[in-house]
Each structure stands twice: as C-alpha cells, then as structure tokens.
Image: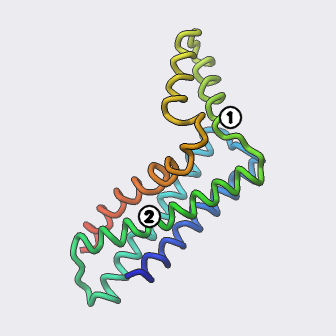
Amino acid sequence: MFHTIVKYGVIAGLVVGGFMFATFLGFDGLPPMKYGMAIGYATMLIALGAVFVGIRRHRDVDRGGVIGFWAAFGIGLGISVVAGLFYVVAWEAVQAVTGLDFATSYSQAMLDSARAQGAGAEALANQFAANLNAGVVRPRWRVPDQVGRGRLLPGLAGGVLAVGFAR
C-alpha cells in the first residue's frame, strides 16, 4: 500500500508541479489570470487521474480485485498528500526562481479587475480586506493553504469519486 501511495503521489506531484513550474517560467512570472486558472485546473484534473489509477492498481494487483471503501479512501488521501508536498515544493521553487511576489501580484490583479468593473473606493477597500482575510497577502499561511486547498481537498473529492468508479 505504501509503495502505491508514494509511486502515484510522486507521479501526480510531478505532473502538477512540473506544469506549474513550466507555466510560470513560460509566462516569465505570473500568467494572465484566465490562462493561469485554466492551465492550473486542467493539470490538477490530469494529476487527479493518478488517484484513480493508484486505487485501481492496488485493488487489482495487490488485493486480488477487492477493496473496501476506507482502504481505497486512505490510498487516495495518501496520494493527495504526497502530491500536495510536491506542489508546495514546486510553488516555492517558482517563487525563488522567478522572484515573484504572488500575494501582491494576485491582490493587485483582483483590485484592478474590480476597478475595471467600475468599483468605487469602498468596494476596493472591501476587496482588499477580503484578500487579506483569505490569507492572500499573508505569506506565513502559504504552505498550509497550498497543501489544504491546493491538493488535499481536490484529492479528497477525487478519492471519493475514484472509490465509486473503482468498484
């Protein structure tokens, strides 16, 4: 079981981390919002396939074709945690190599978007406060946020779906 978790977690992590690193280097920093989100979500969906394949392989090869819900859920969760660690390392590498201050860039992009839609000073202040409260401009929350929302929650959702399809 541990071998399966590590193997497919590394595969998923390399997919997500590799595409993210290539995207940020390709755009020489922060990609345009619409492209960055599309590329990011697409690579996460591709990497999520590793959860499904890992559970199926464990069921078919290691368990003789039978697996319980909690065992499959644990494998999916484990794969997601390993992939999340790779995601965090890749993100920190992007920050180090490009010198990108993502929190400031993202917050500024959100404020520019609100300003372009005709938002007034009060709405802009509310947007900035929302960014602050969401942890966007608080770098010390970056790693737990990336592991939690970046990989773990999508991995949980994918794990539940994969368990259903693997039966």
Q: Residue at x 53, y 14 (%)?
A: 123
Question: Observer-nearest residue: 57 or 100?
Answer: 100
The secondary structure type at the circle numbered 2 is: helix
**Pointer 1: residues within 10 angstroms few (<14), some, or many (20+)?**
some
Report the amino acid beneath label 2: Ser
Q: Which residue is drawn at 44% across and 64% down?
A: 80
> Which quadrant of the figure contains the N terminus?
bottom left
Q: Please tell me whether residue 69 is drawn above or below residue 84 in the rendered image.
A: below
Residue 31 got which mark? none
Question: Observer-nearest residue: 3 or 56?
Answer: 3
**Pointer 2: residues within 10 angstroms few (<14), some, or many (20+)?**
many
Which colour assignment does the render follow? rainbow
Q: Where is residue 88 in the image (x, y as percent from the top left)?
A: 58, 57
Q: Which tag, 1 or 2, sits closer to the chain's start?
A: 2
Q: Residue at x 49, y 29 (%)?
A: 133
Q: Residue at x 54, y 62 (%)?
A: 85
The secondary structure type at the circle numbered 1 is: helix
Label 1 vs label 2: CA separation? 28 Å
Task: Look at the numbered discs 1 and 2 and tell me whether their residues touch, using CB distance below 8 Å.
Answer: no
| Numbered disc total | 2
Q: In this view, does 1 lie to the left or right of 70?
A: right
> Which quadrant of the figure contains the C terminus?
bottom left
Picture quadrant where residue 160 is located: bottom left
Which residue is label 2 attached to? Answer: 80
Q: Position of residue 89 (x, y in %)?
A: 62, 60
Q: Please tell me whether residue 111 is drawn above or below residue 141 in the rendered image.
A: above
Picture quadrant where residue 140 is located: top right
Which residue is label 1 attached to? Answer: 105
Report the amino acid beneath label 1: Ser
Question: Observer-nearest residue: 148 or 65?
Answer: 148
Q: Is residue 158 left or right of residue 23?
A: left
Q: Position of residue 94 (x, y in %)?
A: 70, 53
